[in-house]
Image (spheres, rainbow, N blue to C red):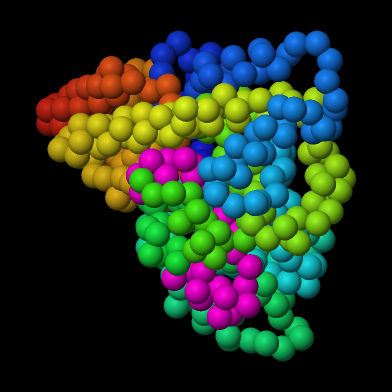
Amino acid sequence: MRAISNGSAAARHGTAAKCQFASDNYAGICPEALQAVIEANQGYTYSYGDDDWTRRACEMLRERFETDCEVFFVFNGTAANALAVATLCKPFHSVICHESAHLETDECGAPEFFSSGSKVLLVPGPNGKVDLGAVERLVRQRSDIHYPKPHALSITQATELGTVYSVEEIREIGLLAKALHLRVHMDGSRLANAMATLKVPLKDITWKAGVDVVCLGGAKNGGALGEAVVFFDRELAEEFDYRCKQAGQLASKMRFLSAQWIGMLENDVWLRNARQANHCAQLLEERLRNVPGISIMFPRQANSVFVDMPARLAQAVRERGWHFYTFIGGGARFMCSWNSSEADVEALAADIRECAELINGNGSPPAA
């Protein structure tokens, strides 16, 4: 399992009284998304997505992507990624992704299950990004009938390690995928945070760069639940609604999924939320960079900070009531959300520094 919480049972299952940094899933619903749901909760309307709220949310996403894409709403990211991969791959195909990608580490075999057997193949790459040389070698190393034929390449934006693919990097991925006859899937659970970093139009890092389908995250950006699966090639989306129904992902009261998107997309609330999360992560990185006994593990490019922290120090910080995950490579991950504030960051950073100074000041160094 990628993320392991080492807090007490009360900490794991109780209600946090202060801002926490274990996950951006800890944050509640942003006011705009909640208000949109309240407004949708008036009277009667059609079910299963045949309502004005869903139609409006789809049109707003088409406007943001600047193309006539096909949009579907599902309950969560696992379903979005797994069903998208199942659409791109037949059972005897394979999908290539980074070894730390959510598709491999946190979907409990859902991509293989919903695709009826498509294999997930892994490649390495620094800072959570796929190594294109490794992708090409993997595709070209075998073409015999005994090997699951590579048919899709999945990338994560922002990555599991908090880094962001540049426009140029995604274009290179798209060009290589085209040359290797691979479809491109983007896990965009934190695409809004990448957008806030890159400050470019959505189209430049999706369909114009060669991405075929993106799973756009809502829950981590201020929604309660619900992800958007966006197909840029409408032929690929044929009968995807049947996949959603069969997988238990077709919401009968769809308007309560889609209305949240209206609240987040209007006035670019989704980007404001992402910018706030990114800003807090940047501030936290600045505050932690010179704390004795710890080091920053990966470039901070979105809303997370990864810290190499001795076990003794991590335990001391947890004992002060802070929740965070021991993550990939054994580091501590601190994730900022739309609802994080500078005051929250300062409080966390102050406790980390004080704990580090107390441990280092008593004559014995932190335990490794």
Residue range corresponding to the magenta coloring:
172-198
For residue 183: magenta? yes
**Quadrant housing residue 38:** top right
- Residue located at (78% from left, 72% from top): 92
State the image coordinates of residue 101 (x, y, percent, origin top left): 53, 55
Q: Where residue 275 sits in the image (x, y, percent)?
A: 37, 33
**Residue 349 colored in magenta in the image:** no
Residue drawn at x 73%, y 13% is 41
The residue positioned 47% from the left and 27% from the top of the image is: 267
Q: Nearer the viewer, residue 205 or 24?
A: 205
Across and down, in percent, residue 280 comes to: 31, 30
With 49 as the anchor, is 26 left or right in this view? Answer: left
Quadrant in the picture for residue 153: bottom right
Q: Is residue 334 visible?
A: no
* Residue 165 visible in image: yes
Q: Residue at x 72, y 34 (%)?
A: 55
Q: Quadrant of residue 326?
A: top left
